Structure formats: C-alpha cells, structure tokens
Amino acid sequence: MNGNWINQSKSLSTVARVLRENYDLWNYREILLPAIEEAGEELDRGTKFTDGREFYLIKPDITSQILSRLTAEKKRKLFYISEVLDGETSGDWQFGAEYIGGDKGWMVLEIISSIITGLESLGIEDFYVDIGSKQVWESATSDLPDLRDEVFRALYHRSFDLIDDLDITEKKKDEVWRLFNFRDQRCSYTRLNEILKTIDDERIFADFGTVRGMHYYEDLTFELYSPATGSPLGYGGEYTFRNADACGFAFNLESLLDVFTGLEGRDREKLGGTNKKKIRRARDRVENGVTIEVKS
C-alpha cells in the first residue's frame, strides 16, 4: 500500500468486513493459515527463503496452501483474507472463497452469485464477470496438438499476434480469431450457456478469450472487471482436489478500492454522561448489536 496507508487500511478493513458478512450469509467459514510454509511442489507463488537447511515460502497462494493441508475430500465452504506474495516483500491483498466437494453444476453458480452479492453489498453495481472455458479451446486445438501450448500462451497474454506467427492454415486462424474475440450472454457451449441462463444477470458473459488464472484451474475460469478501473477485480475457476470437484474465487482488494466509494454510515447511538453510565450503556448496546459512539 502506498500514500495514506491509514486511510487505505481503513477502507480495506471496511471492504473485508462487508465481504466477511456476505460469505457468512452464504454459509462459508473463515480459515486462518500460517504465513510461512515449507516449500513444496504443491504450493504456488510465495516468496522463498532458506534457514540454511530447508526452503520455505512466505505467504504462498492460498488455494494451494489450503489444498496442501486438507486430508480428505469432504464438502467444505471456506473463505480467507490474506496478502499473497510472488517473490517480493509485498504483494496483493486477497479475499477469497473456496467451495470444495459440492455438486459441480451448483458450485460455479453459487460462487458467481456470491461475487454478485458481495459487490452489491459494497455498493458496487457497475461490473461484469467474464467466463471462459478451457474445454472449448482444447476441442478447438485438438487438430493442433503440437501447437496447443502456443495457443494457450497467446490466450494468457491476450495477444493474437502470437497466433499469426503459428504455422497453421488461414481457415484455422479465422476459427481461432472468432473464439478469441467471442463475448456474449449466450454461447454454443451447452454447459456454460446453462450457467448464463440460470444466473440471468446482464453483467455475466461468456468470453472465450478469458482462459487465465492459476495452472490448476480446469474447465471454467472467470475474471471480474469494472469499467471504472483498468485492473481486474478478481479471478477464479474450477479445479479438482483429490477426487472432489471444487471452485474458487479471489477478489483483489486493492483493485476493489479503485471502485469502492464507501458505504452509507450506520447511525451510531451517541453515549454521554459519567464514565460509569457510559461504560454500562456501551456494554449493553454492543451486546444487543447496536453500533455506538462514546463521547470521551
């Protein structure tokens, strides 16, 4: 965080509090994880260091950290807030949710719906979620097995110039170009089309140019944007843990601050009087869920 870090911290705290309340309403439970883990192939990102004997990661990718600690594929609905490092001493603050072991068709619907309610509870209405599909691209490149990695690299970088450089026919380039630029509220991929129809929100799109995120994501991946900022507000996707289907999403909290304009202040009951009266009344009000401001 730069600039006025106290005000930024206050805003981040407000955003995190509202998102916590949102995911609690969806029946997710917060998980608290250690800041340092022993380095291993199952962990992504993080900043590596050594104590002279072993290698460790500071604040790795949370999803990989969660999965490295789970011992059984049972249904879990979790959320977290953490800074995630990527080789540096400072990183991105994330608020994420993971739905593990549920019905594959339902989990994507719930995760995307929780994104919508979370943003709306923050007073953010101007956003859109783009959903892409790896399976669509795997099918489209089934006749290009030796070039599939190059096509996915072009997708990741959103660079069609990389496609133009490939030794493929013009007809195939046209097919890839159409997929690369496809964005609509209906599509030919039946599974994704059903999701769009079920959620039925004008801010949700099929976008086959959206195939990014973490390497462990499988078919559907999604990214969250707002016209008010050039940075993605978050990303997510489907993955598998052991034999269980799963779906997750992470908000970039600092990007959210670019579009978060604050909340209408709750009316706080102002308490005065002697210290004895104030402390008794304050405890009583807080115990009953009343927000207060005590005159000191």
Image (cartoon, grey):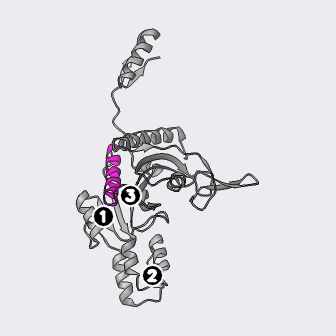
Spot occupied by residue 295 in the image (x, y as percentages of width and height): 44, 17
Looking at the image, residue 58 sits to the left or right of residue 129; the answer is right
Earlier in the chain: of badge 3 and badge 2, it is: 2
User: Which of the two residues, 181 or 114, is positioned nearer the viewer here?
Assistant: 114
- Say which residue appears at 34% left-offset and 60% top-offset: 104
Q: Which residues are magenta?
A: 102-121
Q: CA distance from mark 3 to mark 1?
A: 10 Å
The amino acid type, in three-letter code, at marker 1 is Phe
How packed mark 3 is, by other alpha carbons closer than 10 Å (few <14, some 14-19, many 20 or more), is many
Earlier in the chain: of badge 3 and badge 1, it is: 1
| Residue sticking out furthest to the right | 52
Residue 295 lies in the magenta stretch: no
How packed mark 2 is, by other alpha carbons closer than 10 Å (few <14, some 14-19, many 20 or more), is some
Q: Is residue 14 above or below residue 245?
A: above
Q: Which residue is mark 2?
A: 163
Q: Which residue is mark 3?
A: 224
Q: Which residue is mark 1?
A: 205
The numbered dot on residue 57 is: none
Q: Tag 3's secondary structure? A: strand
Earlier in the chain: of badge 2 and badge 1, it is: 2
